[in-house]
Image (tube, grey):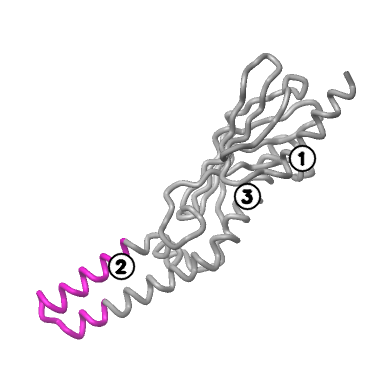
Amino acid sequence: MSEEGTIDVGTVTRVWSVGWQWPWAVILVVMLGGNFLYAADRTVLGIGVLVAGLGIAVAGVRAVTRHSGDAFADGIRSVRRAVADELDLDDTSTIHPLAVGSDSVVGFDRSKRYDLAVVTLGESALTVHHDGSMNLLSRTWTVGDQTERIPYEDVRSVTEEDGTLRMELVDGGTKSLPTDSRPDDLLTALGRRLEGIDAAE
């Protein structure tokens, strides 16, 4: 069963939304304010629109700059808890979300949206939730019900290169999971489990 929830962004929702869409907001404010100034000859109203609109856009940019990192972390924590609940786990330390951002905005380190693959390391196998997502603009996250179980004994090796986690399988196949950042904790933990399988054989 898929799970979904909201992300705590720590600021006013409307200001947050304007911040993520600041290029369009600025264009709209300039067009509207310019129309009042020049076409409608309403100087005071035009100046008011420009000042208020650009002020809100600046506040939005500041909100996203200050809080997007915390919002991303909150979304990841929520996804980990949801997967833990689904798999009936008390500990979330074995759950590793791999995020790939899309729809980036000029000036921000974080992207608006992320596709998530969530890898959970169990006793004898790893489980991959393939269809998770996180949307910082709409402040939502989802964990889908498309899962895949891969026994450790079926994995020959695991590596990360050029933004892709690759698992070479014993049968000659390959499982690839994209990721924006190198998942060092996952690589270390999975490597230990594979070493344990090799030692047991």
Answer with the quarter of the image where residue 117 lies: top right
**Relative to the observer, which residue lies in front, 173 or 87?**
173
Q: Amino acid at mark 1?
A: Thr
Amino acid marked by disc 2: Val
Q: Which residues are magenta?
A: 24-49
From the top left corner, tell me how far across and down residue 5 is, in percent: 56, 48
Point 26% across, 77% down: residue: 49
Q: Secondary structure at mark 3?
A: helix
Residue in the foreground of this view, choosing between 123 and 87: 123
Q: Position of residue 105 (x, y in %)?
A: 41, 57
Res. 76 mark: 3
For the C terminus, the quadrant is top right
List the single residue furthest toward the front.
Answer: 161
- How would you rate the neighbour count of disc 3 (Cα within 10 Å): few for under 14, some for 14-19, many for 20 or more? many
Magenta: main secondary structure equals helix
Dot 1: within a 10 Å radius of its alpha carbon, few (fewer than 14), some, or many (20 or more) residues? few
Residue found at x 48% / y 53%: 111
Local secondary structure at mark 1: helix
| Crowd around label 2: few <14 · some 14–19 · many ≥20 (10 Å) | some
Instruction: Tell which circle, 3 or 2, labels the residue nearer the N-terminal end.
Output: 2
Q: Is residue 106 magenta?
A: no
Q: Is residue 158 above or below residue 77?
A: above
Residue position for label 2: 26
The quarter of the picture where the N terminus appears is top right
